[in-house]
Amino acid sequence: MVYIRRLIILLQRITNQADHLVMAMPFLGRIAIGLVGLIVVAVGLYQIYQGFRAGFERQFQTYALTPKEAKLATDVGRFGTAARGVVFALVGV
């Protein structure tokens, strides 16, 4: 547990240093951070769209499932994909 905390602290420091380096660049730094944020938001919105469209269904074999299992897998997959999209969108903001 202590090692995980130390790893998290180290990763936070590295991320903060990278942010400061990019933001220190005149004009281009802020644009770069903004573009990365927009890309992450776009990926999040696409994930939400995939969740509602159930585009992930090709990743599992519905023919091997009963109709009840297939519906449950589809519903849980939709929820999970949409939830991941919400997280991505929030991180991008």
Image (cartoon, helix red, strand yellow):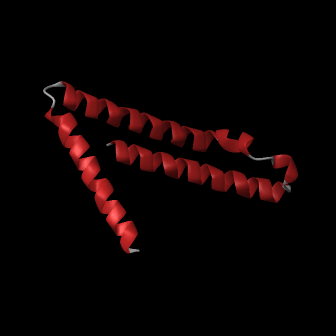
Give me the residue at 16% from left, 30% from top: 25
List x then y, in percent, for residue 55: 66, 38
List x then y, in percent, for residue 79: 58, 53
List x then y, in percent, for residue 75: 67, 54
Answer with the quarter of the image where residue 20 lies. top left
Instruction: Give 30 or 65, whichever is nearer the viewer.
Output: 30
Could you tell whether 91 is left or right of 13 in the image? right
Give me the residue at 40% from left, 38% from top: 40
Locate the C terminus by quadrant.
top left
Answer with the quarter of the image where residue 30 lies. top left
Number of marks present in the image shown: 0
Locate the N terminus by quadrant.
bottom left
Could you tell whether 71 is left or right of 16 in the image? right
Residue lying farthest bottom? 1
List x then y, in percent, for residue 81: 57, 48
Q: Examine the rendered structure and indicate whether residue 58 appears above or below residue 31.
A: below
Give me the residue at 30% from left, 58% from top: 10
Could you tell whether 37 is left or right of 47 in the image? left
